[in-house]
Image (cartoon, rainbow, N blue to C red):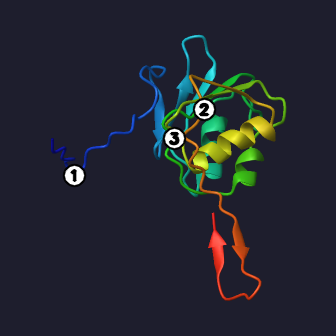
């Protein structure tokens, strides 16, 4: 059997099957409100300007300037990762804020790190049908005593 993958075909899911109606797009992210009025953000990836994107989305999802939504769903399903200042992302929120983060097995790389930051540093609730992909891009390097080479893992 020969399996051939055509160019341009993306086998990774693109996220929620049924996002809230009338969501707006910002880069690859979408945001809006559920039918019951809960603020909703789908983080499809982790671009370098994610902190600034969050500023825009959060400002649009609250009626009070400078405030945060009282209830928020952050949907990270199928987040392909990327790279940004994770501390700057966390600084956009408050510990103990009423936030539920949805994950799935397609969350990888920096998406996993951001989801972990939401859970461990901010105390947000993570839910999903299982763990993330386990492909976080954080690496550690150990240098040989001679200094001639090192190993990254």
Q: Where is residue 77? Give x, y as percent.
A: 52, 32
Q: Is residue 1 above or below residue 153?
A: above
In the displayed structure image, the side of residue 71 where residue 24 appears, left or right: left
Task: Using a 10 Å C-alpha cutoff, classify the residue at mark 3 as few (fewer than 14 neighbours), some (14 to 19) or many (20 or more).
Answer: many
Q: Where is residue 138? Give x, y as percent.
A: 65, 57
Q: Where is residue 16? Give x, y as percent.
A: 46, 26
How far apart in space, not on screen, are marks 3 and 1 (Cα)? 21 Å
Q: Secondary structure at mark 2?
A: loop
How far apart in space, not on screen, are marks 3 and 2 (Cα)? 13 Å
Task: Using a 10 Å C-alpha cutoff, classify the residue at mark 2 as few (fewer than 14 neighbours), some (14 to 19) or many (20 or more).
Answer: few
In the displayed structure image, the side of residue 117 where residue 18 appears, left or right: left
Question: Which of the image's four quarters has the C terminus?
Answer: bottom right
Q: Which mark is residue 79?
A: 3
Front residue (pair 22, 148): 148
Q: Residue at x 60, y 50 (%)?
A: 136
* Quadrant of the image occupied by residue 126: top right
- Of callouts 2 and 1, which one flags the residue occurring earlier in the amino acid sequence? 1
Q: Residue at x 65, y 50 (%)?
A: 51
* Quadrant of the image occupied by residue 9: top left
Q: Where is residue 33? Give x, y as percent.
A: 57, 22
Give the residue pinned by disc 1: 7
The residue at the far left in this view is 1
Q: Which mark is residue 63?
A: none
Q: Which dot, 3 or 2, sits closer to the camera?
A: 2
Q: Secondary structure at mark 3?
A: loop
How far apart in space, not on screen, are marks 2 and 1 (Cα)? 29 Å
Give the residue pinned by disc 2: 131
Task: Please say whether residue 55 is visible from this viewpoint.
Answer: no
Question: Which of the image's four quarters has the N terminus?
Answer: top left
In the displayed structure image, the side of residue 122 where residue 107 appears, left or right: left
């Amino acid at each position: 059997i020969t399996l051939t993958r055509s160019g341009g075909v993306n086998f990774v899911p693109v996220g929620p099957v049924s996002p809230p109606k009338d969501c707006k797009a910002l880069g690859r992210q979408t945001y809006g409100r559920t039918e019951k009025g809960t603020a909703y953000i789908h983080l499809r990836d982790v671009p370098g300007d994610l902190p600034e994107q969050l500023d825009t989305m959060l400002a649009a999802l609250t009626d009070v300037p400078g405030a945060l939504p009282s209830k928020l769903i952050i949907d990270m399903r199928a987040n392909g990762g990327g790279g940004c200042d994770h501390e700057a992302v966390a600084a956009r929120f408050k510990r103990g804020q009423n936030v539920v983060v949805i994950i799935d097995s397609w969350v990888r790389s920096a998406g996993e790190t951001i989801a972990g930051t939401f859970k461990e540093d901010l105390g947000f609730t993570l839910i999903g049908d299982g763990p993330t992909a386990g492909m976080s891009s954080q690496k550690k390097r150990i240098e040989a005593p001679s200094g001639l080479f090192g190993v990254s893992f």
